[in-house]
Image (cartoon, helix red, strand yellow):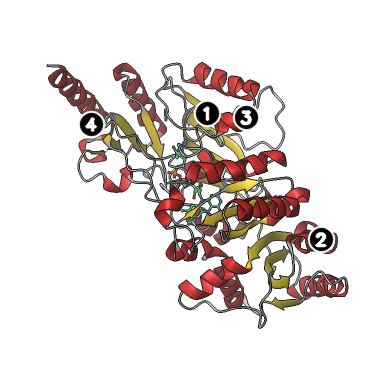
């Protein structure tokens, strides 16, 4: 009897959805893609997937959901690495996919802004900016699939944060449909606006728990005229930190990326990814991939880069360096960095961490945490790489071959996680630098956030979403 009543309610809900968006935009069969996360760790079951076309339709959908007490999982490009865009296993949640909101609404070349809808693919936004001789600097390996709504939901970082900041720094206005169904329209694109609370910031990094972002005003930059990419070999993270300071003193804001790569990380790329070859003739314990750009000529940039590198050689901070000769070679260098994730997956499953500590503490963090892990699990393999210039490491740990199998290693998942995250906490760091909390780290943040921080987060959630229908089970 209970089941029959639920089925009738669900049917009436689905009919309501079809009336709002049209039957072809309500999916109930073959939902596999929408229910499985990118890492294939979480496999949920959705009541349906709805694909609305605009904020007005989303507003009506949310009101319908509130009336039926059906919760919503906002979804954009579905590349979340923390299970943020997957429904739970109840079969009772609605996936609201924003891919159809994909218009570029306006470009203002004097204000240097672009107004886009949430379903625009990041790469399309980058290409549109380029076509107008501008730069939208957010750049990450998932840029061909991830969408602006998801970038905002996760406050995505990527490889140019050093110069241009996270997504948070690139958003000048926002349009959001609130859990009440009201539309908060704040697409002003103002560089100065001190009229009270900066509401847009609440929704950036909220992982869809406070509302559905439908559009945003993005900040554009002048398109660089010259880019120089370099790989250096060096002995330690301490040397890398000193190099970062030296490079900054020579290149200042022109330094856009400063990526640390361990020898093990590089060796996995060379072993597993076809077509990749080492940039330097000799092997080193550590490498840094760095990039700078300039609105002046390449000659000027090269001169500044070469002067800086010569000083680094003289100070014995680096032992070798190679500068890209052209764009193709720069892409090859980036391939060595961007393929690490795939290469390590091919090698073996590993326990991943996306952490940050103050930049000044990175070397100490690595030394201490490596030692703690090695003492507890001799022979452990640490695949360590990341955005050193932002204090952000992807510190991933594969099993010691002599003592563990992949399965026995994953049985220690929580224990290994806790060791690493406790060490992050020891240095005043964060257990999620750029991927978010999602469902992966929801329990873990309770250990590292203060009671007051959690209380304020819960109060904000309760104030905006009293029914708890917006992406429940994620973040808090
Ligand atoms: C290969 C790869 C490389 C990556 N590299 C990086 C990196 O370098 N830096 C980095 O920061 N991240 C990286 N990521 C993860 C990153 O979070 C996502 O790539 C991206 O920002 C998420 O966008 P998406 O459109 O796929 O969002 P989704 O995965 O669909 O959603 C992400 C979160 O945002 C919410 N959300 C989605 N749409 C909306 C909306 N319209 N309104 C409100 N909430 C919404 C979802 O509910 C979910 O919680 C990488 C992922 C992959 C697969």
Q: Earlier in the sequence, mark 4 or mark 1?
A: 4
- Element at badge 4? helix
* Residue displayed at 41% across by 40% down: 85
- Element at badge 3? loop
Residue 219 is situated, as x and y percent measured from the top left of the image, at: 63, 46
Find the distance from the CA under tag 3 to the CA under tag 2: 31 Å
- Element at badge 2? helix
Q: Earlier in the sequence, mark 1 or mark 2?
A: 1
Binning the other alpha carbons within 10 Å of mark 4 as few (below 14), some (14 to 19) or many (20 upward) gives some
The residue carrying mark 2 is 242
Q: Is residue 115 left or right of residue 110?
A: left
Find the distance from the CA under tag 1 to the CA under tag 3: 31 Å
Instruction: Tell me, for residue 185, which label it has, or none.
Output: 1
The residue carrying mark 4 is 18
The answer to whether residue 453 is seen in the rendering is: yes
Which mark is in front, 4 or 1?
4
Q: In the rendered image, which quarter is residue 212 located in?
A: top left
Q: Is residue 309 left or right of residue 50?
A: right
- Element at badge 1? strand
* Residue displayed at 48% across by 78% down: 275
Residue 458 is situated, as x and y percent measured from the top left of the image, at: 54, 21
Q: Is residue 459 above or below residue 234?
A: above
Instruction: Tell me, for residue 171, which label it has, or none.
Output: none
Q: Is residue 397 above or below residue 214?
A: below
Find the distance from the CA under tag 4 to the CA under tag 1: 26 Å
Q: Earlier in the sequence, mark 3 or mark 2?
A: 2
The residue carrying mark 3 is 449
Binning the other alpha carbons within 10 Å of mark 1 as few (below 14), some (14 to 19) or many (20 upward) gives some
* Residue displayed at 58% across by 70% down: 266
Residue 367 is situated, as x and y percent measured from the top left of the image, at: 71, 55
């Amino acid at each position: 009897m209970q089941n029959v009543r639920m089925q009738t309610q669900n049917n009436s809900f689905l009919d309501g959805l079809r009336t709002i968006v049209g039957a072809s935009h309500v999916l109930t069969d073959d939902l596999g893609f929408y229910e499985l996360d990118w890492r294939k760790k979480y496999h949920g079951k959705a009541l349906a997937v709805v694909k609305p076309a605009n904020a007005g339709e989303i507003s009506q959908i949310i009101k319908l959901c509130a009336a039926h007490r059906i919760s919503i999982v906002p979804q954009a490009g579905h590349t979340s690495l923390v299970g943020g865009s997957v429904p739970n296993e109840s079969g009772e949640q609605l996936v609201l996919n924003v891919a159809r909101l994909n218009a570029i609404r306006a470009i203002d070349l004097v204000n240097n802004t672009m107004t886009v809808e949430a379903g625009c693919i990041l790469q399309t936004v980058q290409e549109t900016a380029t076509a107008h001789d501008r730069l939208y600097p957010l750049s990450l390996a998932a840029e061909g699939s991830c969408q602006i709504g998801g970038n905002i939901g996760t406050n995505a970082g990527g490889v140019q944060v050093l110069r241009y900041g996270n997504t948070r720094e690139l958003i000048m206005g926002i349009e959001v449909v609130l859990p009440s169904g009201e539309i908060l329209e704040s697409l002003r694109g103002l560089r100065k606006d001190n009229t009270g609370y900066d509401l847009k910031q609440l929704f950036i990094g909220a992982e869809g728990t406070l509302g559905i972002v439908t559009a945003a005003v993005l900040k554009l930059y002048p398109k660089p005229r010259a880019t120089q990419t370099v790989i250096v070999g060096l002995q330690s993270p301490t040397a890398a930190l000193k190099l970062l300071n030296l490079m900054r003193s020579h290149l200042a804001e022109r330094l856009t990326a400063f990526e640390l790569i361990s020898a093990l990380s590089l060796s996995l790329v060379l072993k597993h990814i076809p077509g990749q070859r080492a940039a330097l003739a000799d092997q080193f314990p550590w490498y840094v991939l760095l990039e700078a750009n300039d609105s002046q000529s390449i000659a000027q940039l090269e001169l500044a880069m070469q002067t800086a590198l010569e000083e680094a050689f003289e100070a014995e901070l680096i032992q070798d360096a190679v500068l890209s000769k052209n764009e193709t070679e720069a892409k090859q260098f980036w391939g060595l960095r961007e393929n690490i994730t795939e290469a390590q997956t091919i090698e073996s499953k590993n326990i991943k961490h996306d952490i940050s500590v103050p930049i000044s503490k990175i070397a100490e963090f690595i030394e201490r945490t490596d030692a703690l892990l090695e003492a507890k699990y001799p022979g452990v393999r640490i695949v360590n790489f990341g955005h050193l210039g932002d204090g952000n490491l992807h510190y991933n740990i594969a099993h010691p071959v002599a003592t563990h199998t992949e399965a026995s290693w994953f049985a220690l998942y929580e224990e290994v996680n806790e060791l690493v995250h406790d060490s992050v906490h020891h240095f005043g760091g964060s257990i999620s630098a750029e991927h978010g909390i999602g469902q992966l780290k929801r329990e873990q943040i309770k250990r590292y956030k203060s009671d007051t921080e959690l209380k304020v987060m819960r109060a904000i959630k309760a104030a905006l979403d009293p029914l708890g229908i917006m992406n429940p089970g994620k973040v808090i």
